[in-house]
Image: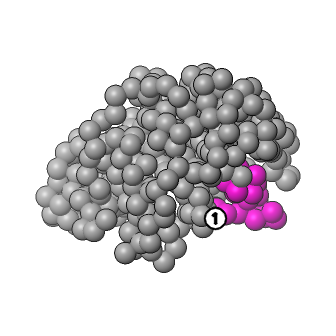
Amino acid sequence: MAKERDEARPPQRPVDSVRVGTAHAAPGAVRHGRVWATGYVPDLMPPLTLVGGARAGPVVAVLAGLHGDEATAVEAVRRLAERLDPEQMAGTAILVPVVNVPGFRDRRPQVNPLDGQDLERAFPGAPRGGPTTRLAHALTDQVVAVADAVLEVRSGGSVLEGLPFCLVEPGVGEATADGADLAWARAVGGDVVVARRPRSLLAAARALGKRSLLVHGGGGGYRPEDAEPLTDALLRALAHLGIAVGAGGAAPPPGQVLTWTWLMAPADGYWRPLLPLGAAAAAGEAVGEVAPLEGGGRRPVAVLAPEAGRVLMRCAALAARTGSALAVLAAPAATT
């Protein structure tokens, strides 16, 4: 069983003690700056906003845009910056709406176009190396290390579409999720996935002893109608830590604690999903199929559910590439 940390709120810190990148927080004020990554020209460095509450409180980092095509998540963090009132806040919010600036500009799914690497698998990074490695290090060193808690904000993109959920990661050597992080996720509402993602942003946060949570807003592509519910979810997440005053909308009923299974493409070809998002799949049932590029009467290859589960995410593109993700199935966790 994982050792549960104290579920009390994070420590209360003076707002003006918080420095992130090129910005310095001030009580009751909003400050702007950038995360400084060595080797980047300034306009490729992630922009950040510090919202300094009028009273001492926790420091929470909210980051989106790790994948440049997850525009709904980016928009939700932008709206969060507009809705936070520093005069009504306790603590400091570090908002980084676009982490992967080159990917966002190029509308590039999943990778940083400067070196073709996936930032989600690059943490904690290193001060020397390629652009993605250096960016991951800068975020870990300047944002994660400063915060008491880290919120990673995700949404469907041009490759994957999905349903809303929260995700928590077990710590290194731990079998289950931390009780405080699970309580945080349940305050947001809806289903909670427990999954280990090596070299992720949350893994870096957990390694530094930070509270950590991923909030996924569902959807796919740029869906402005999904941004407001996701912004509400982020407000509920901040309120749970005592940093923000104000309603974040009615929370969905607490859902199940889930684990997930990724289904990968067995071959190159044309992807055809057979089950909609949220549908239940029985063990051995075809979730979709991949038709061969060559045609010529060749039969499609079925993509089968290895066990019973619900379709949490699926590929939103026609093209299937061998080994790429086609769907994610979620099933109730055996233990929590």
Total tally of numbered discs in the picture: 1
Residue 115 percent coordinates (x, y): 71, 55
Residue type, mark 1 in image: Leu
**Horizontal arrangement in the rendering, residue 133 relative to residue 204 (left or right):** right
Q: Quadrant of residue 97?
A: top right
- Circle 1 SS class: loop
Q: Main secondary structure of the magenta part?
A: helix
Q: Is residue 31 above or below residue 3?
A: above
Residue 297 in the magenta stretch? The answer is no
Q: Which quadrant, please, contains the N terminus?
A: bottom left
Residue 12 percent coordinates (x, y): 64, 46
**Horizontal arrangement in the rendering, residue 135 relative to residue 207 (left or right):** right
Q: Quadrant of residue 118?
A: bottom right
**Horizontal arrangement in the rendering, residue 122 relative to residue 280 (left or right):** right
Closer to the camera in the image, 135 or 4: 4
Residue 138 percent coordinates (x, y): 76, 54
Residue 316 percent coordinates (x, y): 38, 41
Residue at the image point whose x is 66% and y is 26% from the top: 86
Q: What residue would you read off at disc 1? A: 208
**Horizontal arrangement in the rendering, residue 166 relative to residue 18 (left or right):** left
Q: Which quadrant, please, contains the C terminus?
A: bottom left
- Circle 1 crowding by C-alpha within 10 Å: few under 14, some 14–19, many from 20: few
Q: Which residues are magenta?
A: 123-145
Residue at the image point whose x is 60% and y is 25% from the top: 88
Q: Is residue 32 above or below residue 4?
A: above
Closer to the camera in the image, 243 or 286: 243
Residue at the image point whose x is 38% and y is 43% from the top: 187
